[in-house]
Every structure is written in structure tokens, then in C-alpha cells.
Image: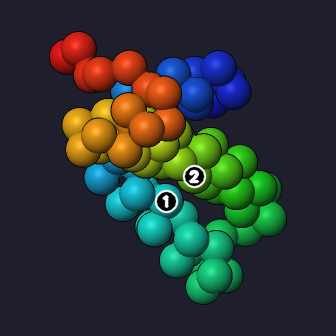
């Protein structure tokens, strides 16, 4: 699977789906259940999943800060969803 298709695939995932897949990958890697080539692929996908989850959390944090007024103190604009 090409790297761009991996990223597009991950971008389509919601936070919970990405976390669940990341947990499965981590368990497989920690358990030594995969061969080296597959482990490298899993690690690469896991890294992209982790970055995706962090991005989703940052988006959620920003929205909560805007809603609660913390964002106003930080100079953030109101949510316009």
C-alpha cells in the first residue's frame, strides 16, 4: 500500500476507530506476533494513526476552549459549526 493511500485511509477514520486500530497494532508489535517486514509496516501505520489521533484531540480541545470561554481569553474565535 502506498504511503499516500495510507494517509488518505487514516484521514477518513474517526478518533475512536483510529485509536482502536492503533491499540491492535501496538498489541501485535509488543507480542512479537509479526515478522520484521510486517512489523515495519505496522510501525509506519501506527505512527500515522498516532499523529491522526493527536490532531483530532487538538481539534476537540480547541472547540471546547472556544465553547467554554477559555478560548476567548486566549484570543480564539467562536466555533461556527
Query: Relative to 17, is 63 above or below?
Result: above
Relative to residue 69, is residue 54 drawn left or right? right
Mark 2 sits on what residue?
50
Q: Which is nearer the eye, 16 or 68?
A: 68
Q: Which is nearer the eye, 80 or 44?
A: 80
Q: Quadrant of residue 72?
A: top left
Query: Relative to 74, is 40 above or below?
Result: below
Give the mark nearest the N terminus, 1 or 2. Answer: 1
Q: Quadrant of residue 6?
A: top right
Quadrant, the N terminus: top right
Which callout, 1 or 2, points to the residue nearer the camera? 2
Q: Position of residue 65 (x, y in %)?
A: 35, 42
The answer to whether the residues at label 1 and label 2 have Cβ atoms under 8 Å apart is: yes
* Secondary element type, mark 2: helix
Q: Is residue 58 visible?
A: yes
Query: Relative to 25, is 14 above or below?
Result: above
Q: Which is nearer the eye, 68 or 10?
A: 68
Q: Position of residue 44 (x, y in %)?
A: 71, 48
Amino acid at each position: 500500500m502506498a504511503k499516500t493511500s495510507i494517509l488518505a485511509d487514516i484521514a477518513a477514520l474517526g478518533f475512536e476507530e483510529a485509536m482502536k486500530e492503533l491499540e491492535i497494532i501496538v498489541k501485535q508489535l509488543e507480542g512479537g506476533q509479526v515478522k520484521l517486514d510486517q512489523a515495519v509496516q505496522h510501525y509506519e501505520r501506527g505512527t500515522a494513526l498516532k499523529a491522526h489521533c493527536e490532531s483530532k484531540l487538538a481539534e476537540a480541545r480547541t472547540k471546547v476552549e472556544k465553547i467554554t470561554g477559555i478560548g476567548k481569553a486566549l484570543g480564539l474565535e467562536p466555533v461556527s459549526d
